[in-house]
Image (spheres, rainbow, N blue to C red):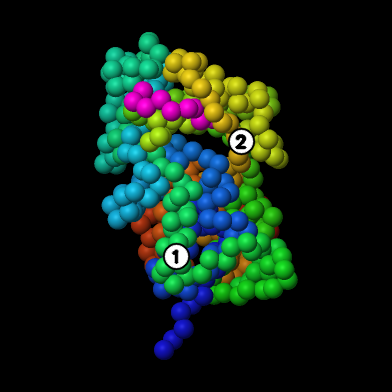
Amino acid sequence: MSMKPRALVVGAGIVGSACALKLQQDGFQVGLIDAGTPGCGVTAAGMGHLVALDESSQELDLCLLSLRLWREFFAEFPDVGEPSPCGTLWVAEDEAQLAEAQHRAATLNARDWQADALSGAQVQKLEPALRPGLAGGVRVMGDSVVYPPQIAYFMAQQLRRQGGQLLLGQRVSSVHAASLKLEDGSRLGADVIVIAAGLDVARLLPEIAVFGRKGHLAITDRYPGRLSHQIVSMNYGQAAVTADALAVAANIQPRPTGQWLLGSCRQDHQTDTSIDPRALGAVLQAAMQLLPCLADMQIIRAWAGMRPASPDGQPIIGPHPLLPGIWVAAGHEGLGVTTALATAQILADQIAARPGKLDDTAYLPSRFFSEHGGKYA
């Protein structure tokens, strides 16, 4: 009887756990390695949205593929990750943003993803807590809110139940062709090694330019029944960047507990996750400009985290150009939760050398390397 091919996945966040589980289901004997516990790193620090973003056609392709895979996941495991199919209400504050909202609705509907263009009065009726006078917006019905650490933990346990291994409390010190070296000096070899270690990719594979974009979040006390949709400003992803590399756009999620999770901002050139009072204040102010009632609500906790980003804003998914047997799944920035299942599917298709469901050219690590000498471009 032939032995199963061996795969190792470094990083038990939601992306790494999804990749590990998919490879196990594809016939590999998988070991999932993490210095901590599944879902405890970047996955635990961010917002848990499953959202169709369309800043580029490639981004929308990836989101829609993943969102459809998430529908299948929750049909099988309906309670994992506390999924809330609340949809997203993108709000436009002026006529220019309203035109963008209407374009977004048309784009999503053309891809069979329901989106309703709304007037200001319709937006106000859907969410009375919003400030009066908004120009309108678009409601995207298929978006959801989830609790990502629970999903990553569940996937890791599914991996174990299906015969895979959890190698927790193990820190990888270096990556080599077809092998890893751990901090205790031991080595592990495999036919396939996937580096899905978030910000740690920059340490393990410095030639892959993953870097951190800092974000701040806050969560309120419980106020059930006061918000039905995830609220996002149409300024999201387009907010002006200040001189100190801070961009802010409101994103407010109603959690199943009745709490409101408030974001979001992006701040470059930061190296730690300590709270920056000015950045946090800007996040809260942006949220209150859309939902004035927040001024009377109790904030019970605030924190900061780092999103693993790539130089061109697209995730990095595919084989390392210089290290045989090494694959990368990293750089998803704010879409790691949304696109985790699509990332796992793309990676598994690449490894199996089978046709994928979308063109993966925009995600390959080789795009960052020059053609001559294989050096980093």
Label 2: element kind? strand
- Numbered range of the magenta stretch: 218-227
Residue at the location (48% across, 15% down)? 296
Does the magenta run of residues contain 348? Answer: no
* Residue 122 appearing in the image: yes
Nearer the N terminus, badge 1 or badge 2?
1
Amino acid tagged 1? Leu
Q: Which residue extends farthest top?
A: 133
Label 1: element kind? helix
Residue at the location (29% across, 21% down)? 126
Looking at the picture, does residue 265 appear above or below residue 339?
A: above
Who is closer to the viewer here, 205 or 287? Answer: 287
Q: Main secondary structure of the magenta part?
A: loop
**Residue 59 percent coordinates (x, y):** 44, 43
**Residue 266 percent coordinates (x, y):** 58, 33
Who is closer to the viewer here, 348 or 287? Answer: 287
In the figure, residue 129 lies in which quadrant? top left
Amino acid tagged 2? Ala
* Residue 361 appearing in the image: no
Give the residue number, with chain letter if any, for mark 1.
159
In the figure, residue 98 lies in which quadrant? top left
| Label 2 CA crowd tier, 10 Å (few <14, some 14–19, many 20+) | some
**Residue 200 percent coordinates (x, y):** 64, 53
**Left or right: 270 as drawn, with respect to 123:** right
Distance from disc 1 to disc 2, alpha carbons, whole Å, reads 30 Å
**Image quarter (top left, top right, bottom left or bottom right) of the N terminus:** bottom left
**Residue 375 percent coordinates (x, y):** 68, 58
Disc tally is 2
**Left or right: 228 as drawn, with respect to 332:** left
Residue at the location (40% across, 34% down)? 257
**Left or right: 129 as drawn, with respect to 302:** left
Give the residue number, with chain letter if any, for mark 2.
304
